[in-house]
Image (cartoon, helix red, strand yellow):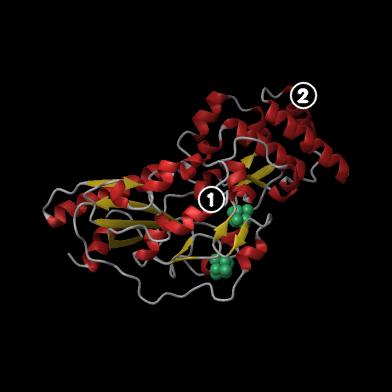
Amino acid sequence: MDAARLRQLAVEAGLDLVGAVPVRPSPTWDAYVHWVDAGYAGGMAYLTRADAVARRSDPRLVLPQARTVLVCGVSYAGPAVPSLPPLGGRVARYAWGPDYHDWLLARLERLVQLLEGALHVSVVSRCFVDTGPVLERAWACAAGLGWVGKHGCLIHPGLGSFVLLGVALLDVDLPETAPGSLPSCGTCTACIDACPTGALVAPGVLDARRCLSYLTIENRGAIPEPVRAAVGGRAFGCDTCQDVCPWNRKPMKGASTDSVPETAVLFLPDLLTMDADTYARRFRRSPIWRATLEGLARNAAVVLGNTDDPAAHPYLVAAATGHPSPLVREHAADAIQRLARRS
Ligand code: SF4
Ligand code: SF4
């Protein structure tokens, strides 16, 4: 099998990008350890537990017989960002459609099946989309798919950085798709300059504790008061550093994505009154599920406190006095005060 055939099979499986590299100790593992030691992972225990850190040092700690790291990618650049309606909150682009963990994993597993057919062998594999102890971006770079931009995301020269990654560890050898000559960020600092909270503390180094994506999705506690205004209209996640990246302004050739803007904007009052059944019905198959109902209601209160729309006030009063979660009540009360200070 050559690299061209591998790409053909990837396209057949519904993938935009594919690369392969012989297994070896993980590139950039030292930088990851420094990042964890600096506290930049915030409360993401799945990244900071000692066993999780150790297992990321070498894929053979995950699959002892691994010989190849296969990396795939799918663009989710999709349609233009819709304008924000009254009392609406933005959703990060990757969550506009069905949960990519499901459909991208299915495509990656399909690629492994196609490889088995093409190689006439049975392949032992472990496939991961975000959920495994592998350093996806580092392996994507090693396989020649792009470089890590100063915003910390992989940039593919044709597809930009709105790319979802999956990794499969395989017990067979595949042709290496080593990096050719790739461009770089050069002197650009647009993402660092545009970040509303200064979360990009050095080129490619994210302090998650300051990042609105982390604070509105992974964070289970309060959004720190000093950054609540910076949340702006973001109800779930943040795309700012990628939106300003010049590599995302090019037309997206060959992009295939299931993302549709069905949840690009959320009506915030709904989030303040939603019950658990409705939340599960609406978001169980969406990446938004990750934020939890309480977290989304907290975010809704913060965003409503950032609007200049008087229509937000009664919803915030109702949440500040009657919401079952003390966390949401506190954020709603604070939002009312912030609205009052600006009126
Ligand atoms: S996602 Fe938003 S808050 Fe996080 S680094 Fe990018 S611009 Fe900053
Ligand atoms: S905005 Fe500029 S510096 Fe940031 S990742 Fe894109 S090219 Fe690199």
Q: Please identify the quarter of the rendering in which residue 119 is found.
A: bottom left
* Residue occupying the point 31% across, 62% down: 19
Indicate whether 158 appears above or below 71.
Answer: below
Indicate whether 181 appears above or below 302.
Answer: below
- Residue marked by disc 2: 321
Where is residue 155? Give x, y as percent. 47, 65
Which of the image's four quarters has the C terminus?
A: top right
- Secondary structure beneath dot 1 equals helix
Q: Is residue 186 left or right of residue 111?
A: right
Q: Please identify the quarter of the rendering in which residue 29 is found.
A: bottom left
Q: Amino acid at mark 1?
A: Asp
Q: Amino acid at mark 2?
A: Thr
Q: Nearer the viewer, residue 79 or 273?
A: 273
- Residue marked by disc 1: 37
Q: Nearer the viewer, residue 257 or 248?
A: 248
Q: Please identify the quarter of the rendering in which residue 43 is found.
A: top right
Dot 2 or dot 1, earlier in sequence: 1
Where is residue 317? Give x, y as percent. 79, 29
* Picture quadrant of ligand 2: bottom right
Q: Is residue 149 left or right of residue 310?
A: left
Callout 2: few (<14), some (14-19), or many (20+) C-alpha neighbours within 10 Å?
Answer: some
Indicate whether 42 appears above or below 58.
Answer: above
Which of the image's four quarters has the N terminus?
A: bottom left
Where is residue 152? Give x, y as percent. 52, 60
